[in-house]
Amino acid sequence: MREGLIIKGYGGFYFIKSGEETWCCRGRGRLRREQSPLPGDRVFFTPLEQGEGVIESIQPRKNALPRPPIANVDQVILLVSLAGPEPDLKLLDRSLVLCELKGLGVLICFNKVDLVDSEQGKELDKIYRSAGYQTILTSALYGTGLQNLRQVLAGKVSVLSGPSGAGKSTLLNALDPKFSLATGEISRKSKRGKHTTRYVELLPVGEGFVADTPGFSSLELPPMKRAELSRCFPEIYQFAGQCRFYDCVHINEPDCKVKNALEKGVISSSRYQDYQQFLEEVINKERIY
Ligand SMILES: Nc1nc2c(ncn2[C@@H]2O[C@H](COP(=O)(O)OP(=O)(O)OP(=O)(O)O)[C@@H](O)[C@H]2O)c(=O)[nH]1
Ligand SMILES: [Mg+2]
Ligand SMILES: [Zn+2]
């Protein structure tokens, strides 16, 4: 038996990367009934002939995303364009909350630096760095920041996510033109087409893998408790337990360390405003278990 990583699956076939080789495998019947294999799964398989084989077992998963369906995701890279389309910080903050809730590593990539003056990019970058996030600045068009991107992808399974038009597919093509991912209008037209199915594929970059995903334009937060929300904002969570009231939600309470930090400019007002808005949404949906 050999060990490998599923990089793609369709029609009951799974493509498995094992060392330098790729094998096309089916799953054992028992396996198919119990747990269907996903890209990102580490598996044991029996090689047959001509690059074909049979998957015998799936190693335990550390996590699995439903959309896109990928197992063992190490990190999500949230791609936001600095212009064309304008950055939607509310959508970015929602995406960050969802990653934090799932316990996924997350990193922000600001793309299209060529379309803004460098101060604009730096300003946004600073907000998210001081919130505690790792960030990179790129231009898929001019190849800026690609080395940094390669570095963060190394040795990991990453998912590239973000609004439609941010430049996800263009950025991956810039890393390796062989990917030939559809970009721009072509990509959007094919999404509207009825008969196009999008398969998830882990693309090899150096010693790591990255999956392109279709863009989105809105996100809803799942039901959660109000205390959970503050855990999803690292710059707020760092003050946990330090306010006068143990159950402080950092809105109107006296002696609130978070409000204090906000007034001093330690916490960014745009991040805090989004926290405020999300808190309202959470309270509206809150269920006491
Ligand atoms: N100026 C500039 N344009 C870019 C850059 N990156 C991507 N674009 C353009 O932005 C448009 C959208 O790029 P895509 O790569 O299709 O965006 P996407 O995020 O994959 O979009 P979806 O697949 O719809 O989610 C294309 O016309 C690209 O040429 C960049 O760094 N600078
Ligand atoms: Mg795309
Ligand atoms: Zn507080």
Image (cartoon, grey):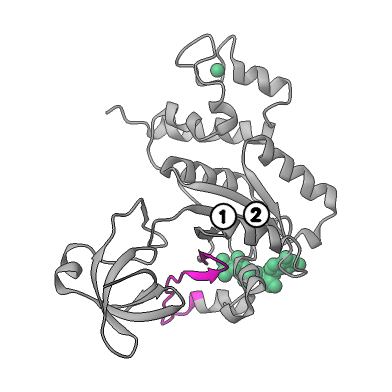
Residue at the farthest left position: 30
Identify the residue under disc 2: 109
Q: Amino acid at mark 1?
A: Ile
Q: Position of residue 176 (x, y in %)?
A: 62, 75
Q: Residue at x 35, y 63 (%)?
A: 41
Query: Which residue is at the front of the view, 92 or 101?
Result: 101
Q: Which residues are magenta?
A: 191-212
Query: Badge 1: how crowded within 10 Å, few (<14), some, or many (20+)?
Result: many
Q: Secondary structure at mark 1?
A: strand
The reply to whether callout 2 and callout 1 are in contact (CB within 8 Å) is: yes
Q: Position of residue 149 (x, y in %)?
A: 65, 59
Query: Which residue is at the front of the view, 187 or 176?
Result: 176
Q: Mark 2 vs ligand 1: CB under 8 Å? A: no
**Which label's residue is closer to the chain start, 2 or 1?**
1
Q: Residue at x 60, y 44 (%)?
A: 90
| Left or right for 209, reference 195 | right
Q: Quadrant of the image for the C terminus?
A: top left
The number of numbered badges drawn on the structure is: 2
Q: Amino acid at mark 2?
A: Cys
